[in-house]
Image: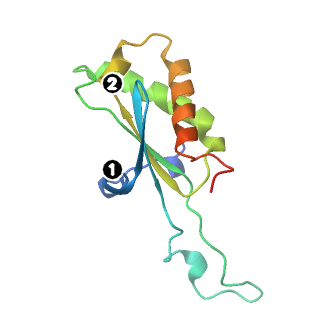
Amino acid sequence: MALPKANRLKSRRDFQAVFREGIRRHGSHLTLRALRVSPSSKSPCDAAPEIGETKNIKHITPAQIGISISTKVSKRAVVRNRLKRQIAAALYELLPKISPGWRIVVVVKPTAAEMKCVTQQFLQELEQLLEQAEVFYGHS
């Protein structure tokens, strides 16, 4: 299952910001990079309030996730795309647990190409890494 458009990290600038400023958590097949994003000050909620509304409403961006997989993992695009789809499916299952306002990049290590029973292992490893990074609800 693909990630919803609102939850995809797309721009090069966003990826670079996560790599530059984000925290790192390492697993055996994946590396997680996460960056907490402050609520945007230029959101439509900060404009002049309507009658009966308050101006203190904060615009919270949904968690945005990107997957980075290099040709070092596999020279074959078919293999890289399959791994990317399996990781996206695992992330889709974990998405309801992830608190909003995070930008996350999952970096795939070359050892991931040799795995069997991939999706379930990715799910377990991602859950463990997200827990370590305190990205789930309940951590602030």
As drawn, the residue found furthest toward the top would be 116
Left or right of 140 on screen, residue 64: left
Q: Is residue 86 above or below residue 11?
A: above
> Is residue 2 visible to us here?
no
Q: CA distance from mark 2 to mark 1?
A: 21 Å
Q: Is residue 115 above or below residue 106?
A: above
Residue depicted at x 50% and y 77%? 41
Residue depicted at x 50% and y 24%? 122
Q: Which x, y percent locates residue 50?
A: 69, 86
Residue depicted at x 26% and y 31%? 70
Label 1 CA crowd tier, 10 Å (few <14, some 14–19, many 20+): some
Label 2 CA crowd tier, 10 Å (few <14, some 14–19, many 20+): many
Task: Give the labeled residue for mark 2.
Answer: 80
Q: Which x, y percent locates residue 74?
A: 26, 20
Quadrant of residue 90 in the image?
A: top right
Label disc, if present, on residue 19 of the rendered structure: 1
Viewer-nearest residue: 96 or 51: 96
Residue depicted at x 33% and y 50%? 19
Q: Which x, y percent locates residue 1?
A: 55, 30
SS assignment at label 2: helix
Kind of residue indicated by mark 1: Phe
SS assignment at label 1: helix
